[in-house]
Amino acid sequence: MPVRKDFDIDEVARLARQLMAELGIRLRGKTLQATGWRFAFDRARTRLGCCSYTAVKGGRAQRKVISLSRPFSERYGWTVMEDVMRHEIAHALDVDQRGRTDHGDQWKRWAVECEADPTRLYEDGDVQLPPRYVAICPVCRARTPYHRRPRRAGACAACCSKYNGGRYDPRFRLEFFEAGSAPAEQLVLF
């Protein structure tokens, strides 16, 4: 799938809110916004969308938000994000009906009604974001991509297992680099 970086994020938001209104009216008789749902972008880099709510006594939901990942929306636009939005709207409808949601049979029925792919995860391997960071083991030079830099020091699991019985060893502490400035691999000639 070709990647563009110039998708209009405001257009994605407009289309998401419009879809919330249209599907709400078609499937429940009023817009999702009228039932308390709102749309937002989030900063997620490992998931495409989220249906978030806070359940209170009596099974009624408060703080109802359907969000799409801003980084994915900017990178892939509405063509990819429309199915994600339909998936999350199915969760919202499920919450409004049952007071909870999951990826079970009831949600799958809502997903079909919303014309969403009724699967739990997006399965297209082409839809991903490049990592921001690369961690490199100082011993084996293994490279591990990260979207966020961890707050605590970590070590190479393979080296810790091989040389220290699986326990942390500072000799194998990972070195972090911004993905674009990580050192190139050096070839060793024998």
Image: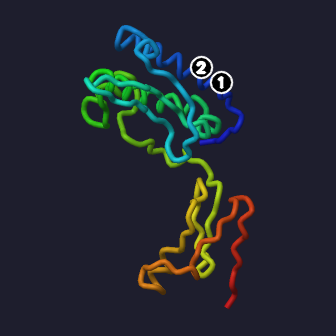
Outermost residue on the front side: it is 57
Q: Kindly identify which numbered label has been placed on residue 190.
A: none
Q: Are marks 2 and 1 in contact (CB under 8 Å)?
A: yes
User: How far across and how far down the image is residue 26, in percent?
Assistant: 38, 11
Q: Secondary structure at mark 2?
A: helix
Where on the picture, by quarter, is residue 98? top left
Work out whether 131 lies above or below 190: above
Say what amino acid the circle numbered 2 marks: Arg
* Residue depicted at x 49% and y 43%: 47
Relative depth, front residue between 149 and 3: 149
Residue drawn at (57%, 65%) of the image: 144
Image quadrant where one finds the N terminus:
top right
Q: Residue at x 35, y 25 (%)?
A: 61
Q: Position of residue 174 (x, y in %)?
A: 60, 72
Query: Where does label 1 land, which residue?
Result: 10
Q: Which residue corresponds to mark 2?
A: 14
Residue type, numbered disc 1: Asp
Indicate the secondary structure of the residue bearing disc 1: helix
| Residue 183 in the figure: left or right of residue 95 | right
Name the quarter where the C terminus is drawn: bottom right
The relative height of residue 129 versus residue 32 in the rendered view (above or below) is: below
Q: Is residue 182 left or right of residue 48?
A: right
Dot 2, crowdedness within 10 Å: few (<14), some or many (≥20)?
A: few
Rendered residue at 46%/15% (across/down): 33
User: Is residue 77 in sight in this rendering?
Assistant: yes
- Residue 59, percent from left and from top: 27, 25
